[in-house]
Every structure is written in C-alpha cells, then in structure tokens.
Image (cartoon, rainbow, N blue to C red):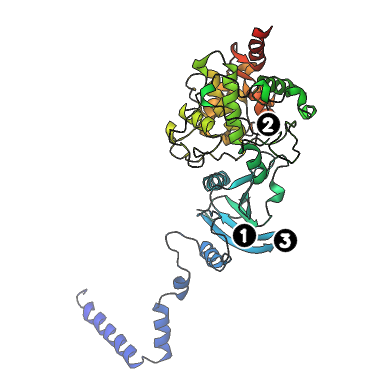
C-alpha cells in the first residue's frame, strides 16, 4: 500500500507548481512569497559578535560628535574613551568623554603623559580632590576631571560602572586648580635654577664634598629668617638646626642686582620642587657625615654623561641630581628604570618621592620587599592602593624606624598617606633633620654639636 502513495504525492506537487506558475502575479502567490521571505527587521537590527542593539545606537550617536578643528594636538587623549559632547565655556572649551575603564587607570595615564611630555603639573589628584589633574605648557592650560559613574540598567556584558572625563582647555582653565603655595614657572626658574638668585643653594663644588653646602661667611643665619613664626611649632626646631648647619642657607645676592630682593624669607608653606629637594638631600647628608667620607654622596663631574635628558651638564643642579642617580638613590636608566628618562626638575616633590629618595640613606641597605597588604597592616593607611609600587618598599621600611620614621616626624599621626600630595619646604626640612634608623642615626642637632666642638 505504501509504494502506491508516491505517485499521488508527485502528482500533487506538479499540480501545485503549475498553479503557482500560472498565477505568478496573483494575490495568493504574493502572499505565499512574502511568508517565505526573510524578515527585513533582522537585516536592520542584526547582532554581530554579541554586540547589543543599544551599543550600536550609541556608537552612531558618538560618531556625530567631533572634536573642534583647532583642538590642540599636544593634549593627550585616552584611546579607550568616546567623545560625547563639546561645549564652549567661559575660559575655553569643555569636552566630555566616557570610558569603560576604571578611573585609576585613566588617572595614571594622564599623570604619566603630562610628565613625560614636559607639562608643568599645577594640581595632582589628592584625597581631598582626587579626580582633577591640571597642567600647563606654554600658553595652554588643561584641566582633566575624572569621575566614576554608575551605569543604569547595564546590558549583560556591559560593566556596572563607566568613567566620565571632562577635558577643559584654554588660556586659564586651570588657574583655580593651582595650589596657593605653588609657584609659577618663572618664579620656580628664578628661585631654583639661577645661582645668583636668593633661593639657590649650591651646587657644592666637587672638591669640597666633605664640607657643608655653604660656609658661615656667605650664608644667612637662622635668626635672619623673618617668617619662622609661620612654621608649625613641631617643625620649627628642625628648620633652625638645618639652617644653622648650612643646609638651608640662603645665598646673599648683595651687589649682584640693583633691585631690592628679600633674602630672609624661608617660605615654609611653599611647595618644594624636585631639584630643590635633591640639592637639600645631598647637602644634608654630607653635612651630617662631614667626618665620615664613606657615607657621603659624591657629586658628579661634567665628564660623565647625563642620566636625564632634561638635566644637561650645564644645569646648575647637575652635580647633585646626577650624583644621586650615580649612587642609585633615585630611579633612572642607570638603576634599570628605562622609563625614567626625565627628571622633571621643576615638578613638585610628592610625599612618596620624598620617602623613596630618603629611606636608602637611612637604612644604608637594600629595601625589603613589600606589598599593599603588608603596608596596610603596619601603617593602617586607608589609601595604600594609591602608593606607587616603587615607593611601597620605602614606606614599609620607614615603619621600622618607630618614632624616628620620616612619616611620623613630618606628618604626625595619620591614616591617610596621600602619596601624590606635594611637599612643602617645611616638611622637606623636617624629613632631612635625621638620618639613620632607630637608635643608630645622627640628627642635625648632633651634627651641630660636632661642628662647634673644636671652637669651644
């Protein structure tokens, strides 16, 4: 019975095909053709490699927003951020961006990009205002505000948070971001780069490395500092001892200029630059160990090749900065840090840099290994995750110095280290008042007694 059904099936198909051919333009045929055709909505809303329809719409919207034609090419742009909006502002132009990357990664990108391209950092992220980086180069000022944002109704493969960036640029957009204690580029260059200026200290001649930075005949004494009343009481004695030792002496410029210049101001709240701290660090160490040449830092001569491309041999601070690099006390290509090709002498010194440069001169041995958990358990810092990995070992080693630790002496009791916060001149002086470990070190007061003992 089954074989007999096959001819009937073939006959039915033939009749159907004949009907369709004969009625190709009939309504029935068209309805049948449409029912068998592909859904046009699938072509317009296809999902490729798991990308959501919402993401595609966002990308189409973003493509319509373009940077201004005159957008400065010097401003670094984070590659994994999409431009959302461009609006004029009273001080320049504001651009808004979105990125799926964490805010700390974007913050690190902008900090390193500005530093690597010789921007002057006007403000770095701090714990009080941790989302703003302000920088200036020539007549261009830039302010980058970085803010994490929660994503409402995220797609299955979409992060729960985004990062919003506001990049404002113009002639004075970052003016309010500059700390009151910071200096302008011209002020910084005048005070720390020129040997004849009142704030210049050194360089120490290579032939006198075992002597203090200045002799009593050409330096101001502490009694001539007229603004020591502005120094916190707990730091005042440190500054007085170091100045009497010759480390913080201010070179007189009498007869070098017809313009009256105040030379008796210590300016304790002023932000100290990296070059000035390097100079003080060498001068303080060598003054502390004036009778122990084995512990002194040798100043570099002009015959060596500079470790940093922005500190040539003609730089007045070259002997100290190069000497620190030659001794391996600051990161440089000589110590295997191939990315540290710039010293950035006029950039503000940060807290973590102060500790990183100073601790090797306290311990006189290799710093111990460290991780975030170890530092958090010892110091209890809430912001331990913001400390640069290079500085973690120095911060942990400083804890072993108990009451003689630099952090305790300079900043007192604190649960916030604020590693990127700029250091003041008073804080830098307090750090240099004592060299060594707990029970085995020398203070500026001890060095003063040794210095005066032959005269008594």
Q: Which mark is residue 95?
A: 1
Mark 2 nearby-residue class (10 Å; few <14, some 14–19, many ≥20):
many
Report the side of 6 relative to 189 (left or right).
left
Q: Quadrant of residue 130?
A: top right
Q: Nearer the viewer, residue 331 or 80?
A: 331
Report the side of 139 relative to 181 (left or right).
left
Instruction: Name the residue carrying label 2.
Output: 425
Please state, as top left, top right, bottom left or bottom right, where the N terminus lies in the image: bottom left
Are circles 1 and 2 on residues that touch, CB within 8 Å? no
Q: Residue at x 45, y 71 (%)?
A: 42
Q: Quadrant of residue 414?
A: top right
Q: CA distance from mark 1 to mark 3?
A: 13 Å
Are circles 1 and 3 on residues that touch, CB within 8 Å? no
Mark 3 nearby-residue class (10 Å; few <14, some 14–19, many ≥20):
few
Q: Secondary structure at mark 2?
A: helix
Label 1 vs 3, first from the N-terminus: 3
Label 1 vs 2, first from the N-terminus: 1
Instruction: Name the residue carrying label 3.
Output: 90
- Marks 1, 2: nearer the viewer: 2
Q: Position of residue 200 (x, y in %)?
A: 64, 33
Q: Nearer the viewer, residue 243 or 408?
A: 243
Q: Which mark is residue 4?
A: none
335 up-or-down from 166: above or below: above
Total marks shown come to 3
Q: Quadrant of residue 419?
A: top right
Q: CA distance from mark 3 to mark 2?
A: 35 Å
Mark 1 nearby-residue class (10 Å; few <14, some 14–19, many ≥20):
many
Are circles 3 and 2 on residues that touch, CB within 8 Å? no
Residue ranking furthest to the top: 456
Q: Residue at x 39, y 82 (%)?
A: 33
Q: Residue at x 50, y 41 (%)?
A: 342
Q: Is residue 148 visible?
A: no
């Amino acid at each position: 019975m089954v074989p007999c059904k096959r001819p009937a099936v073939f006959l039915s198909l033939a009749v159907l095909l004949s009907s369709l051919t004969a009625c190709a333009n009939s309504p029935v045929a068209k309805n049948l053709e449409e029912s068998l055709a592909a859904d046009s909505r699938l072509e317009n809303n296809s999902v490729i490699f798991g990308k959501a329809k919402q993401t595609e719409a966002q990308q189409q919207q973003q493509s319509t927003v373009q940077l201004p034609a005159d957008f400065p090419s010097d401003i670094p742009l984070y590659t994994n951020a999409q431009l959302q909006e461009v609006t004029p502002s009273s001080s320049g132009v504001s651009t808004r961006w979105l990125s799926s990357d964490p805010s700390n990664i974007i913050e690190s990108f902008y900090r390193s990009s500005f530093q690597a391209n010789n921007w002057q950092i006007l403000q770095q992220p701090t714990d009080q205002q941790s989302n703003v980086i302000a920088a200036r180069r020539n007549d261009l000022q830039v302010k980058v505000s970085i803010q994490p944002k929660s994503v409402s109704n995220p797609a299955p493969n979409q992060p729960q948070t985004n990062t919003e960036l506001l990049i404002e640029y113009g002639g004075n957009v970052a003016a309010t971001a500059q700390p009151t204690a910071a200096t302008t580029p011209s002020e910084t260059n005048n005070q720390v780069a020129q040997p004849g200026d009142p704030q210049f200290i050194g360089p120490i001649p290579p032939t006198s490395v075992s002597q203090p930075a200045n002799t009593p005949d050409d330096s101001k004494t502490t009694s001539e500092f007229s603004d020591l009343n502005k120094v916190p009481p707990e730091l005042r004695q440190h500054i007085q001892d170091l100045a009497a030792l010759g480390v913080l002496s201010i070179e007189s410029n009498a007869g070098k200029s017809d313009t009256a210049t105040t030379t008796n101001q210590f300016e304790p709240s002023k932000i100290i630059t990296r070059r000035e701290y390097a100079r003080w660090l060498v001068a303080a160490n060598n003054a502390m160990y004036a009778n122990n040449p084995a512990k002194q830092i040798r100043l570099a001569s002009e015959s060596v090749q500079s470790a940093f491309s922005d500190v040539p041999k003609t730089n007045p601070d070259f002997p100290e900065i190069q000497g620190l690099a030659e001794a391996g006390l600051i990161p440089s290509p000589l110590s295997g840090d191939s990315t540290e090709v710039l010293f950035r002498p006029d950039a503000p010194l940060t807290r973590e840099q102060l500790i990183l440069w100073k601790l090797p001169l306290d311990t006189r041995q290799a710093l111990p290994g460290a991780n975030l958990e170890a530092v958090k358990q010892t110091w209890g810092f809430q912001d331990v995750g913001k400390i640069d990995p290079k500085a973690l070992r120095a911060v942990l080693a400083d804890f072993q110095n108990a009451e003689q630790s630099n952090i305790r002496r300079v900043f007192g009791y604190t649960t916030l280290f604020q590693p990127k916060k700029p250091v003041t001149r008073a804080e830098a002086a307090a750090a240099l008042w004592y060299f060594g470990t707990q029970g085995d070190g020398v203070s500026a007061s001890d060095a003063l007694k040794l210095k005066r003992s032959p005269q008594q």
